[in-house]
Image (cartoon, grey):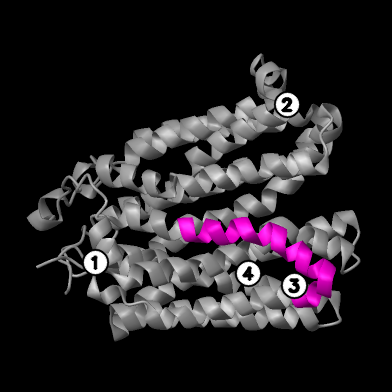
Amino acid sequence: MHHPDSTDQASPPRTRVRWLILGLLFAISVVTYIDRVNISVTARHMMPALGLTDQQMGLVFSAFVIGYALFQIPGGWLGDRWGARIILTIALLWWSAFTAWTALAPASSLAGWLGIVGVLALARFLLGVGEAVALPNFNRAVTDWLPARERGLGIGIAIGGIGIGAAVTPPITAWIMVNYGWQTAFYLSSGLGIALAAIWWLLARDHPADHPWVGERHLIPAEALPRMASPAIPWASLRRTPTVWWLALSYSCLGYVAYVYMSWFYLYLVNVRGFDILRGGLFASAPFLAILLFCPIGGWATDRLVLRYGITPGRRKAGMAGMLLAAAAIGIGALVDSPYLAIASLSLGAGWLYFTVGAYWSSTSDLSKVHAGSLSGLMNTGANIGGAISPTVTPWIAEQWGWPVSLGVAAAIALIGGILWLKVDPGKGLFREP
């Protein structure tokens, strides 16, 4: 049964202001990864300064992932209910405050109650809660602002900002830490987030019909005007829509592989491929630059494929092709002897992995425009389940059988994620009882 809120519903008009909205989402995406990644660099000075062991720092890192995973669905629901403008503004202020508190927490009175590890873990957990709101509300904004034929490109541009954030944060944070102290890195990134929250609030609106710079408001069809989303997540409909769960399962495969890059790629280059610390840091940015390039290209490709073949074939071709090519590139990179060929192949693997992002996230809008935030939050919960497993399992497999096997497992998981696209059918929409 085709849901009336699916892609055939009247779309917002084509207005140049939509590119402003996408630019702001891209900037927010960059900031999310600055605030997420900076602690992995500052840890080098934080740990001796605060007397933390590797295991204790690992607990602090894990606290972020827990908060981030748990609040994906609530964060998406809030966007569906209240709109992306106010929810993203509050979220930016929230996680910027806890970014700054990461530097202040060890000296706070609360540290006397929870201990330094406990108070840092709490700060990172609450940071994760705030950042969990981001990507589902990106999808909410893209769904409300862009015609259906452009949503893959739109979400690809928005999420592509993580490539810049993940690539530039380590060297910039390291420089700030060495010259001004590790606390300063958190204060500056917090200030950046607060400034961006103000800009987003001033320039963004929930819908083209609400924006004073959109001259075409009188052309917006009545059925495309903003309306209050259902306040309840339609769990009964979700249970009866297999595509939702296949989509989440496939995306959990992407999450597993993505976190291999985020947690172990730099150390793999230094410890396994023999690069020194500086060159390892330079080359470790290559996968994230590939993400920056491939993410919007993949979004554009899935939009073109949808126009040519229809919703389900168009999303499936882009999603499956990207995951299968990622599996092949990662497998080759794991086996080649040349460290430079390995970097090139593994970086292409990351690029092809994120080539699929437009297909994944647009599929949630295809299923239900009204519940795009909640559905994408559910899907991204799957990614973070995979992401929570990956940082621990990857080095364990490498210790037992070697890094080629460990990366080969990541390639196999990407392959499985691609095959699961055969079960994904967003064109049918979200199941409803007659």
Please, is residue 26 above or below residue 96 in the view? below
Task: Point out residue 166 in the picture as x, y percentages from the top left corner.
Answer: 65, 52
Please, is residue 39 above or below residue 151 in the view? above
- Amino acid at the residue labelled 4: Ala
Closer to us: 13 or 158: 158
For residue 430, which numbered disc appears in the image?
1
Let me know if residue 172 appears in the view.
no
- Amino acid at the residue labelled 1: Leu
SS label for mark 3? helix
Which one is earlier in the sequence, the residue at label 1 or at label 3? 3
Q: Residue at x 49, y 67 (%)?
A: 251
Q: Which residue is mark 3?
A: 406
Let me know if residue 85 appears in the view.
yes
Please, is residue 91 above or below residue 411 in the view? above
Query: Real-space Cα distance between discs 1 and 3?
Result: 37 Å
Answer whether labels 3 and 2 touch (C-beta < 8 Å): no
Q: Which residue is mark 2?
A: 116
Neighbours of disc 3 within 10 Å: few (<14), some (14-19), many (20+): many
Q: On the picture, is 326 further left or further right than 57? A: left
Q: On the picture, is 323 further left or further right than 425? A: right
Residues shaded magenta:
381-406
Task: Point out residue 97 in the picture as x, y percentages from the top left corner.
Answer: 54, 27
Which one is earlier in the sequence, the residue at label 2 or at label 4? 2
